[in-house]
Amino acid sequence: MEKVRIRYKEKEYEYPKGTTLYDIAKDFQKDYEYPIVLAVRDYKLKELFHTVKEDTEIQGFETLSDHSGHKAYKRSACMILLKAMYDVVGREKLDKVKVEFSMGDGYYISVKGSAVLTEDLVSKIKARMRELVDEDITIVKKSYPIDKVREMCSEYGMMDKERLFHYRISSSVNMYSINDFTDYYYGFMVPSTGYVKYFDLVHYDEGLLLQLPKRLSPLEVREIKETPRLFNTMMDATKWNEIMRIETVGELNDQISAGRINDIILVQEALQESKISEIAREIVKEKKKFVMIAGPSSSGKTSFSHRLSIQLAAHGMKPHPIALDNYFVPRELTPVDSEGKKDYECLEAIDIDAFNENMTDLLKGKRVELPTYNFITGEREYKGNHLSMGPEDVLVIEGIHGLNDRLSHTLSRDDKYKIYISALTTLNIDEHNRIPTTDGRLIRRLVRDARTRGASANRTLGMWGSVRRGEENNIFPFQESADAMFNSALIYELAALKQFAEPLLFSIKKEDPEYQEALRLLKFLQYFLGISTEDLPRNSIVREFVGGSIFDV
């Protein structure tokens, strides 16, 4: 029997020609804590059904606790849920099943049709999911001609997918099947249903909540943590998408190709301005002196704080934007994280004492000189920026720790108005393939960091894991304490960011550690028709990332 040589971790192994990556992975599973679900061969992610027909190198394997492996698990769980729903309820009673948005560790899923969701029906769907997992059915991937895929989508009533593939240039599309159920997913899947052992399904609000493990605890499903403010904010955005009839990328592309994108932009920008005005009115009504704005990276906090300041001024106030970054401790005093790197995301990176002293003095009517942080020297500087507060003055303070009362511990809660801001996209690729809010923010950051800081895509992608850990520790735990939530995502923004992000991602070489993520994002951006940013309003939050903002961002 003909053999092929596999190079892995600087050693060579021989296998019969045609051996699957699944069988090879079994030989190395002992070296990994969690089940292997994907392989990295020739610097590209591969599903385990692929065979080895020539000498090759395997750079590593992805398990359930790795980024791509975890995404494959969640994607596969969604497909198993859909298969179970069709088995239990029947296709004829389901007009639409849509994976709406992330909620905690899982997904909120809406269901439309003649079937009425009850606790008993949800229990039956969950039981059917367990049966499918126990049967350990191979998830089959097969390529079809694009015309055949459109025909299949039409037969299944998946008109969102048919519309999506109208804009697909390639001649074929990969589809996945679990027995007789076939669907499209834009990312990789686990080898079989038997891998998806850990999940829960509950009736939640008017839909379903599919609970899944966190990436770093892939064998554990945590209890649901209620986040009513965030849920309502996401539902509001979802309803607006429905009203505008742009729930999926295919529908957005329809509007772009029909020449109606400028109307979409104006409506979206007007909606955001209306929301900002409502928040300003509430701040004035409650006579707040400190507006604390916080949100994860690339949420548009700076643009939002400027726009809020304008609205406050329109309501008769004198706003003063203050960036918490100006209170960074000297760089040599910045704490380090578990990897020994400087942790600029932790609360201790801020000089809390200096901040509280300044804010307390201002509240007492004293004249205070505010600092400016020099990111080149790593020191705070004082350049004569003096401030004192009168009855109409209000401080608009933005930074990732704004919602944490430890930051402003000397200030009364009655004087503070807390705002949580994030880019909570509710646009889907199609009804079964959602766009993670983190992807939207990551693409924003790629574009902004390259433009304003000269940062390479490698550097931004390489730092993203650390940034995300900082958000999990320092921002998300406090989001429900906010007095208001603002969603900075815009339906059209990924179509606008596409032209800036793609060249950056193409610059990443296959030998680079960030190559797999770059490929994933490039594939994702292919779904969008691009639009010009020339006609974007100069105060748009998108301008903070692509440039041309009227604000100093």
Image (spheres, rainbow, N blue to C red):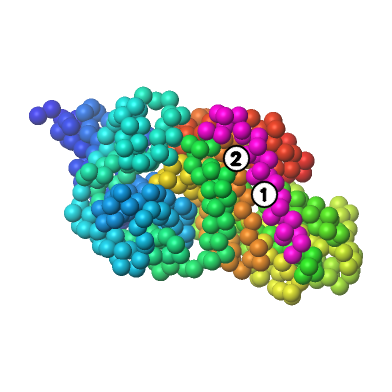
Amino acid under disc 2: Glu
- For image coordinates 40% across by 35% down, the residue present is 162
The numbered dot on residue 271 is: 1
In the visual, does 527 lie left or right of 354? left
Q: Residue furthest front?
A: 114
Give the x, y percent position of residue 376.
Answer: 72, 45
Dot 2 or dot 1: first in sequence order is 1
Query: What is the quadrant of residue 222 in the picture?
Result: bottom left
- For image coordinates 21% across by 58% down, the residue present is 131
Give the x, y percent position of residue 553.
Answer: 73, 44
Query: Is 529 rendered above or below residue 243?
Result: above
The numbered dot on residue 390 is: none
- Tell me which segment is drawn in magenta: 254-282
Q: Secondary structure at mark 2?
A: helix
Give the x, y percent position of residue 461.
Answer: 52, 42
Query: Is 533 rendered above or below residue 68?
Result: above
Q: What is the total number of numbered labels drawn onto the structure image? A: 2
- For image coordinates 71% across by 74% down, the residue present is 413
Q: Secondary structure at mark 1?
A: helix
Amino acid under disc 1: Leu
The residue at which mark 2 appears reads as 493
Report how far apart the C-alphas of labels 2 and 1 lie in the structure.
15 Å
Query: Is 122 rendered above or below residue 183?
Result: below
